[in-house]
Amino acid sequence: MRNSSTNFFLNKVKSNKLLQDSFWAIFGNILSKGLSLLSGVLVARFLGSEVFGQFGIIKNTLMTSAIFATFGLGYTATKYVAENKTKKNEYLGIVLKYSQLITFGFSFILAFLVFIFSNYFAKNILDEIELSLPLKVAAIYIVFNAVNTTQIGIISGYGGFKKMTKINFYVGVFTFIITTILSYFFTLYGALISLILSQIFNWFLNYKLINNYKKEYKNVTNSVVFSRKIFQEILIFSLPIALQEAIYSISSWGVNIILVTFATFSEVGVYSAAMQWNVIILFIPAILRNVILSHFSENTNNEKQKNKILKRIVLFNFLITFIPYILIVVFSGFISGFYGTSFSRMGDVLPVLVLSSVFLSMSNVYTQAYLSSSRNWEMLFLRIFRDLGILIVCYMMVSNNFKNLPSSVLVALGIVVLNFLFFIIMALNYHTKIFLKWK
């Protein structure tokens, strides 16, 4: 009986493409992230805390710039490729060509600006003029990271999650070897050059895979006739996504400014440490975004199947975040103890802030549903409500010292409340269009 039940379960998994794609997406990212984490530990040992801190500042600056450089075309590519990969039309060739060209153009301009203003940024923002040259050297990272993001979107649209697992493994091994060697011999510059080389290697493997898909589906020719209509459609679809990412960045930055202005850097430290656990809980829901968007887009004209997938993924994301949340609440005091005595207040912040990840994971599913239905502008207005709402609520509570609670706790409360309201409103609006009717 047990063997027959096991075989039934395995056969069901094998016949369910959504489960298969989800498995390969998770498995591939665990391999890649695990090797990256190991190489990161070695780099920290080789560089020492001060130089590793400089490396971290430069890397975070470049990654933030690369997010803007993609112009939201990763999600756009996933949706359009998933919808048109089996059709004989002009869409697919133009999407493949111009999504990558637009990403390259925006990222190149941004990388050029970082190169030109590296002296000003290093001196006035980082307060370390010696970092000007490393910033110049590493600016090319922005281009390859942005293009890789769009390539991943294209591959996700084709449903190539198993093949991406192999790529992630190869890139992880390559990154581990090259980072270890170059960082050991060339310290900061070695770490930065290895960062660039790993992105170039990833781009090359993605490029080969995309070409293979183009040959496999045989509906994309090398000679693509420019269509202003489709070109504008791609930009219009991507614009609200790019604006959403910009608003989120401003909101996240603004919360830290509120804490610095009305509290202390110690409160910022407690809040930042608690946010690390948010990222951990959201690891699996985050890497499943392209999987979800791809399957939603494939079922654009099958609303019943789409809603079936939607309900299942919302429930899955709830369970995959709520169970760890309960464990973190139970062990919050134990966790905060690892950070030292200066983080004693983290035990109060952690249970509140991590709750927001539960609502955020479920709302992310609806985000992909909105994107697959081309309801990007509705999504933008809802994101403005949430992200600017977080800033306003946090400012009001912290500046007025609400209930005499610590500032980090007040910020956590504001984030939880707005993320809860955001999930409820976006779910209601998706099914009923009770708030917004603009498609």
Image (tube, rainbow, N blue to C red):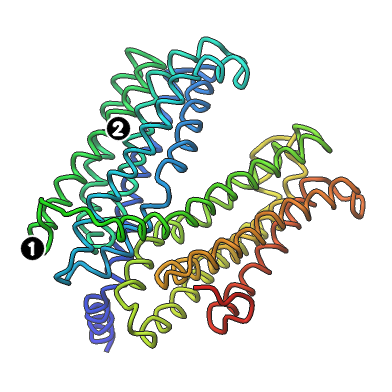
Left or right of 395 on screen, residue 173? left
Left or right of 369 on screen, residue 122? right
Residue drawn 31% across the image and 48% down it: 31
Task: Please tell me in which quadrant of the rendered image residue 368 appears.
Answer: bottom left
Quadrant for the N terminus in the image: bottom left
In the rendered view, would you say 184 is above or below 287?
Answer: above
| Dot 1 alpha-carbon crowd within 10 angstroms: few under 14, some 14 to 19, many 20 or more | few
| Dot 2 alpha-carbon crowd within 10 angstroms: few under 14, some 14 to 19, many 20 or more | many
In the rendered view, would you say 302 is above or below 260?
Answer: below
Q: Which residue is mark 1?
A: 218
* Residue 146 spot, x, y in % from top left: 36, 41
**Residue 64, label in figure:** none
Residue drawn 19% across the image and 63% down it: 90
Q: Residue furthest front?
A: 228
Q: What kind of element bears circle 1?
A: loop
* Residue 342 spot, x, y in % from top left: 75, 34
Task: Name the amino acid type tagged 1.
Answer: Lys
* Residue 421 spot, x, y in % from top left: 68, 69
Left or right of 276 on screen, residue 93? left
Q: CA distance from mark 2 to mark 1?
A: 36 Å
Residue drawn 41% across the image and 60% down it: 237
Task: Name the amino acid type tagged 2.
Answer: Phe
Q: Residue furthest top?
A: 130
In the rendered view, would you say 229 is above or below 261?
Answer: below
Q: Which residue is mark 2?
A: 176
* Residue 419 spot, x, y in % from top left: 65, 63
Which numbered mark, 2 or 1, is in the foreground of this view? 1
- Pick the residue in front: 304 or 17: 304
In the rendered view, would you say 431 is above or below 120?
Answer: below
